[in-house]
């Protein structure tokens, strides 16, 4: 299974925002830290804001911050939401599948079980689990760490 770049960027934005704590961060700041496109991040931030993961503040001095504490952000739920097209193989989408063997094939059930195991493992973790070594992340991203204490 391969996550989309969109989902990868969602996770990166969430990690960066968590490291910043209550401080507002900007799309350009995150884009520069990761060396990725600010235009791609605009879509990511919009999605994360719409789904309640980020609080955004418009205008001069605006930016974004986590809406919840890192330990409240379930990775399985976040990844499942970001991976809106969970069609691992063609037969997972009965409306568009042209698979001739779908009615007799066991591959679909095996792959579905594997996909659910993947999401199940992610669901055992929160954003806080990704921040157990914040100093190293902070140095790598060039950010002053301001984690919100629980």
Image: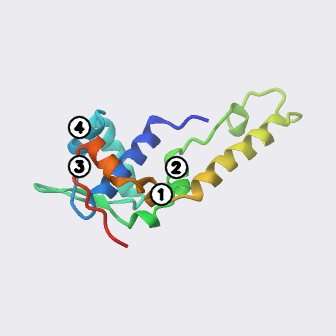
Residue position marked by numbered label 4 in the rendering: 32
Q: Residue at left 29%, top 49%?
A: 138
Mark 1 falls on what kind of element? helix
Towards the viewer: 117 or 112: 117
The residue closer to the viewer here, 119 or 52, is: 119
Residue 41: give x, y in percent of width and height: 32, 41
Residue 129 is labelled as: 1
- Asked which quadrant contains residue 63, the reply is bottom left
Residue topped by disc 3: 143
The residue where tag 2 is placed is 79
72, above or below 88, in the image: below
Residue 74 in the image, given as x and y percentages of width and height: 51, 60
Packing grade of label 4 (10 A; few <14, some 14-19, many >=20) is: some
Q: Where 118 sits versus 67, above or below?
A: above
N-terminal label among 3 and 1: 1
Of all residues, the one furthest to the bottom in this rendering is 150
Q: Which residue is outermost to the left?
A: 60
In primary-sequence order, the first of circles 2 and 4 is 4
In the displayed structure, does residue 9 sit left or right of residue 88?
left
Crowd around label 1: few <14 · some 14–19 · many ≥20 (10 Å): some
Task: Using the image, determine if residue 57 lies above or below residue 29.
Answer: below
Specify the quadrant that holds the C terminus: bottom left
Asked if one can make out residue 45 in the rendered structure from this viewpoint, the answer is no
Residue pictured at 35% horizontal, 65% vertical: 67
């Amino acid at each position: 299974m391969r996550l989309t770049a969109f989902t990868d960027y969602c996770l990166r934005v969430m990690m960066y925002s968590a490291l910043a704590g209550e401080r507002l961060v900007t799309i350009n700041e995150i884009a520069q830290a990761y060396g990725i496109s600010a235009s791609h991040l605009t879509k990511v931030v919009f999605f994360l804001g719409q789904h309640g993961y980020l609080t955004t503040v418009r205008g001069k001095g605006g930016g974004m911050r986590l809406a919840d504490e890192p330990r409240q952000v379930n990775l399985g739920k976040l990844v499942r939401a970001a991976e809106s097209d969970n069609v691992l193989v063609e037969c997972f989408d009965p409306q568009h599948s042209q698979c001739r063997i779908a009615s007799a094939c066991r591959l679909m059930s095996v792959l579905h079980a594997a996909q659910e195991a993947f999401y199940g493992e992610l669901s055992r973790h929160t954003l806080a689990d990704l921040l157990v070594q914040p100093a190293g992340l902070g140095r790598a991203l060039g950010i002053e760490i301001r984690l919100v204490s629980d």
